[in-house]
Amino acid sequence: SQQGEEDPQALSIQEGENATMNCSYKTSINNLQWYRQNSGRGLVHLILIRSNEREKHSGRLRVTLDTSKKSSSLLITASRAADTASYFCATVGLYGNKLVFGAGTILRVKS
Amino acid sequence: DTEVTQTPKHLVMGMTNKKSLKCEQHMGHRAMYWYKQKAKKPPELMFVYSYEKLSINESVPSRFSPECPNSSLLNLHLHALQPEDSALYLCASSQDRGLSGGRVSYNEQFFGPGTRLTVL
């Protein structure tokens, strides 16, 4: 069962631009994670943000979390063609028994 | 070694066949997972193993049978599958944070490249 909804479903930008993806979820969480998936391959973990954190950075990635609105955003700055992939948010509930994925955003970066 | 390996990469089978998918990790992770992913959809959890014991079965049909022979290996045995079972099957592992109350993992999961399964 899906926990989150992601917005937009698809995003197409030029190389060098910033890309912002949003994720909303329904139940209280322990943490929220973002993953990237290149076409037809396994997922790669990008960043984990805990429920008591509001913002986290990793290289060109910036993630925010607003637990009052049950939402998160992933910002990729200075995008590259290699960033073309599907991006999923995934939540771990308060009792931490499993990861539940959102629907995903397909990002295309044109060179 | 931070890699999860899966074999085979591709598998085509008939509805009467029996086959197995294999997954291996050497990161010392004690939680391992099977996911099913249909095209343009997010991964859906099937099974979770914690310390080689099945801790979560997401109401998966019995034609899928998981097995965890040791802490590094995870198998998924397939029998009498249907064409709608065609999908990408992903294995993942993570550091286990404890067994109390059925909690398995708060941490990041490491995914294998997947097995692309086609059922004819």
Image (tube, coloured by chain):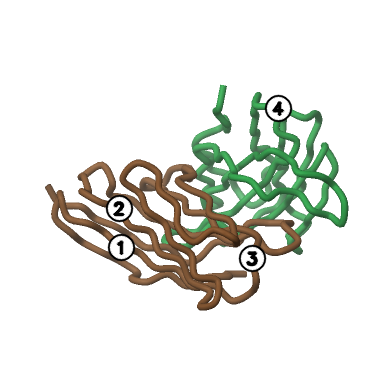
Q: Position of residue B73 (x, y in %)?
A: 72, 30
Q: Nearer the viewer, residue B13 or A13?
A: A13
| Same subunit: marks 3 and 4 | no
Q: Is residue B55 left or right of residue B16?
A: right
Q: CB atoms at circles 1 and 3 under 8 Å apart?
A: no
Q: Nearer the viewer, residue B32 or A91?
A: A91
Distance from label 1 to label 2 (Cα)? Answer: 6 Å
Crowding at label 2, few (<14), some or many (≥20) Cα neighbours within 10 Å?
Answer: many
Residue A53 position (above or below residue B70): below
Residue tagged by mark 1? A20
Give the colour of chain B. green
Give the colour of chain A. brown
Please state which amino acid type lies under the numbered disc 2.
Ile
Seen as rendered, the residue at the extreme top is B1
Q: Nearer the viewer, residue B96 or A53?
A: A53
Q: Answer with mark 1 or mark 2, whichever residue precedes in sequence.
A: 1
- Residue at the (59%, 60%) spot, across then down: A52
Q: Position of residue A9 (x, y in %)?
A: 35, 69
Please state which amino acid type lies under the numbered disc 1.
Thr
Please state which amino acid type lies under the numbered disc 3.
Ile
Distance from label 3 to label 2 (Cα)? Answer: 23 Å
Q: Is disc 1 placed on a helix, strand or loop?
A: strand
Residue tagged by mark 4? B28
